[in-house]
Amino acid sequence: MVPPQITFRELSHFLAVVCQGGFVRASESLHVSQPSVSQSVQSLETKLGTQLIVRGRKAIALTEKGEVLRRYAERTLREEMSLRDIMGRDSQGLEGRLRVTVPPALSSVCFPAIIESFCREHPGVMLEIDESPSEKLMPRLRGGQTEIAALIVPGGEEALHFYPLGRDHLCLVVPDAHDLAERRSCALSEIIQERVALLREDFKINRFILQAYAGHGAKPRVVGRTGDIHLLMAMVRSGLGLGIIPSALCRGVWMEGVRALHLHSPVMGFDWALATRRDHGLSPAGEAWRKTCLEHFTHSILPEENLLEEGSSRGRPS
């Protein structure tokens, strides 16, 4: 009797549960129902005759056999992606599927223009976009669930290759009526006791903010958090608290009624980059995506002098 065959779908669902840390988040990242994800994992456990995942109230954990399958699944899906790349390279134009990951904070601000430009230039590529903060996208990259991801450059990731996009820093955003609104810059010590509205806790920039506050022997007085830049600016406009965000986000209609100042002492700087696995070169479509992203970041998103002029003197798009 031929044993039941394991499918790519089952392996993808299993890895999503592992990478996302649960069945609900896995279903959201895959855009499928939670029962479908659960069914895939149960099917794997039945076919392999062993428990793979220990389901807890708040988290999941891999069994010893589950860890073995994780490594196998990552290797298998990487090979599947490589095969698709190789088979599509003889086409006249770029074709096939390209899986990319972008940070939630930047997705609705910086990437619409990038996506429009890329799709217009390469209509044969089916672009699959996943929004994921840094903590969650690293396992997706290592596991082959995405080919290329935009992120804040982390330390100690020898398995990844980084393509720099540019240097960025955190800015202070205040309502037009605030006492600091006419300033171009502000020291952190000047607003250390002010209430602040920040991006979600799983966003990496919060590490820089906490470290900067700790240098002054303080903690931020957080009164609101969100992953949506429009909602964050609404909090700032309402007077709920001041905002601290990357300068790349200090542009657009949401800046109406607020102004951005350069925040220093310390300057909270960081580098944006595209990341791929070192053991897997970029596909032609991935290389095209990299070039499109670099062009937009260089000319539109991170020209620092434009951001400071726009944010500090007017706080709204020209």
Image: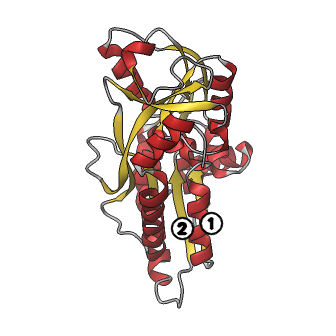
Left or right: 84 with respect to 160?
A: right
Instruction: Say the numbered circle drawn on residue 116.
Output: 1
- SS class of the residue under badge 2? strand
Q: Which mark is residue 98?
A: 2
Q: CA distance from mark 2 to mark 1?
A: 15 Å
Pick whichever of labels 2 and 1 is earlier in the sequence.
2
Above or below, 105 against 263 in this view is below
**Residue 210 appears anywhere in the view:** yes
Instruction: Give 309 or 130, whichever is nearer the viewer.
Output: 309
Q: Position of residue 6 (x, y in %)?
A: 57, 61
The colour scheme used here is secondary structure
* Quadrant of residue 209 within the rendered picture: top left
Give me the residue at 68% from left, 32% from top.
231
Q: Residue at x 47, y 69 (%)?
A: 81
Are there few (<14), some (14-19), or many (20+) residues within 10 Å of tag 1?
A: few
Which of the 4 image quadrants contains residue 280? Answer: bottom left
Task: Tell us which disc is closer to us: 2 or 1.
Answer: 1
Using a 10 Å C-alpha cutoff, classify the residue at mark 2 as few (fewer than 14 neighbours), some (14 to 19) or many (20 or more).
many
Which residue type carries mark 2?
Leu
For label 1, the SS is: helix
Residue 296 rendering spot, x and y as whole percentages: 48, 61
Q: Nearer the viewer, residue 37 or 248?
A: 248
- Which dot marks residue 309? none
Which residue corresponds to the image point at 69% horizontal and 21% vertical from the top-left? 238
Residue 1 horizontal side relative to residue 268, left or right: right
- Considering only vertical position in the picture, is 119 above or below 277? below
Tell me where residue 266 sits by quadrant: top left
103 versus 95 height, above or below? above
